[in-house]
Amino acid sequence: GQQVMQIPQYQHVQEGEDFTTYCNSSTTLSNIQWYKQRPGGHPVFLIQLVKSGEVKKQKRLTFQFGEAKKNSSLHITATQTTDVGTYFCAGRAGGSYIPTFGRGTSLIVHP
Amino acid sequence: SAVISQKPSRDICQRGTSLTIQCQVDSQVTMMFWYRQQPGQSLTLIATANQGSEATYESGFVIDKFPISRPNLTFSTLTVSNMSPEDSSIYLCSGRLAGETQYFGPGTRLLVL
């Protein structure tokens, strides 16, 4: 079945440093979504990428979808303590109506 | 967007008992799902709740253990039956609108003693 690998599992950064999490799928994806889960909270939708090579930005967050539509990344510039949480990617393969979630990357920002 | 509420928000249950979790969505979502999440872990899909028919379960999950109902477009229940300590987890309801954005409820934190 479809597998979605996400790395790293944890990332410690000093406030102001950049952060990147990577997501790789074993199959070509129709789309990929990113979610953020704050400690003690529930996943909150951030964005969806659909097109090959697509790049979207939300303030300090940059999302990319690979040309082959099998990988994606989330990059945060100049992290802040409010960025703390776990970031999940969720990829949906063609023919499936259900996305597969990666295991998430937990971001810890040290002030 | 959609706002999803769940109740109870948390519970402590005895081994062998059952707990029913309710999920209410404020919009008519196209699909509803139930997930389980261990602390610090990823989301594991239990089943897709189908309106007016039996839920579609993922591998490793069965109807006898996790009966699900969805009598209408905006409401669903998940029952965790004959609980054991291994069932201790966070159970999340999720609804999807057209366009595939998924919204999650706040979760039900279950501890089985």
Image (tube, coloured by chain):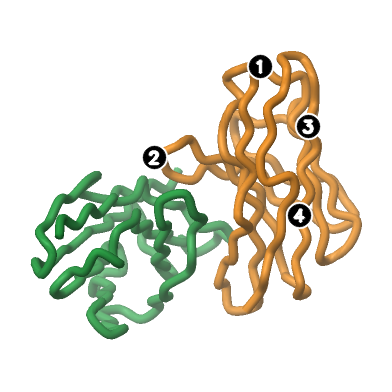
Residue A70: give x, y in percent of width and height.
29, 62
Q: Quadrant of the N terminus of chain B?
A: bottom right
SS class, disc 2: loop
Instruction: Give the CA distance from mark 3 to mark 4.
Output: 13 Å
Front residue of B44 and B6: B6
**Residue matched to label 1:** B84
Q: Amino acid at mark 2?
A: Gly
SS class, disc 3: strand
Q: Quadrant of the C terminus of chain B?
A: top right
Image colour for chain B is orange
Mark closest to the chain's N terminus, 4 or 1:
4
**Residue matched to label 4:** B23
Task: Determine contact: label 3, label 2, CB under 8 Å.
Answer: no
Instruction: Give the CA distance from mark 2 to mark 4.
Output: 23 Å
Q: Residue at x 49, y 45 (%)?
A: B43
Label disc, if present, on residue B19 of the rendered structure: 3
**Residue matched to label 2:** B40
SS class, disc 4: strand
Front residue of A66 and A7: A7
Q: Residues within 10 Å of mark 1 (few under 14, many from 20)?
A: some
Residue A90: give x, y in percent of width and height.
42, 59
Picture layout, residue B78 above or below residue A67:
above
Front residue of B19 and B81: B19
Instruction: Give the CA distance from mark 2 to mark 1.
Output: 20 Å
Which quadrant holds residue A28?
bottom left
